[in-house]
Amino acid sequence: MIKQIFTILLIGLSSHCIAQDGESKSLALEAEYLQELEDIKIEVGEQHPDYAISLTSLGEFYREMGDYSKAESNLLQALEIKQAVLGDQHPYCANLLNTIGGLYCDMGNYFKAEPY
């Protein structure tokens, strides 16, 4: 639970730094996200919902930064984990599908966004 709160705070902070054009701050936040991801991976493993949450947060960070290929990679990996662990019909999976569709819209790839 503490890690989830930390992740939510990082998302808010990253949005603020991006809005303030703080590239160096954004790079520092990226390092924080990557360290958090590694810590959770060690703590619970790669097939755990908490790991998927961290991947989603990192994907959202990259989306905000405009690094769509990294965002897509992280979000799709998170989706695979959530579907495997929680099932295709779980609300968390639906939310993530929506997020991925939004990413594809941001990219201007409406054909790829349509199934999401």
Image (cartoon, grey):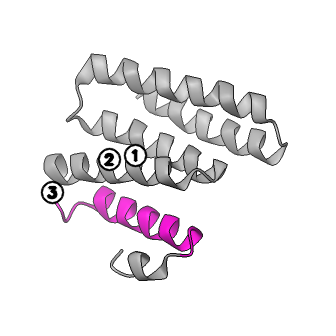
Specify whether residue 22 is in view: yes
What residue do we see at 56% from left, 46% from top? 62
Q: Say what amino acid the circle numbered 3 marks.
A: Gly
What residue do we see at 32% from left, 34% from top? 51
Crowding near the residue tagged with mark 1, few <14, some 14–19, many ≥20 C-alpha atoms within 10 Å: many
Which residue range is magenta in the image? 88-108
Tell me the CA gap for discs 3 and 1.
19 Å
Front residue of 93/67: it is 67
Q: Earlier in the sequence, mark 3 or mark 1?
A: 1
Q: Earlier in the sequence, mark 3 or mark 2?
A: 2
The residue that disc 3 covers is 87
Q: Circle 2 — which element?
A: helix
What residue do we see at 44% from left, 70% from top? 101
Closer to us: mark 3 or mark 2?
2
Q: Say what amino acid the circle numbered 2 marks.
A: Ala
Q: In this picture, is 32 found above or below 83?
A: above
Horizontally, residue 13 falls left or right of residue 67, namely right
Q: Residue furthest front?
A: 69
* Residue 111 % position (x, y): 42, 82
Q: In this picture, is 85 found above or below 104?
A: above
Tell me the CA gap for discs 3 and 2.
13 Å
Horizontally, residue 36 falls left or right of residue 24, namely left
The residue that disc 1 covers is 74
Horizontally, residue 102 falls left or right of residue 25, namely left
Closer to us: mark 2 or mark 1?
1
Q: Are marks 2 and 1 in contact (CB under 8 Å)?
A: yes
* Residue 99 % position (x, y): 45, 62
Q: Circle 1 — which element?
A: helix
The residue that disc 2 covers is 78
Closer to us: mark 3 or mark 1?
1
* Residue 58 % position (x, y): 49, 40
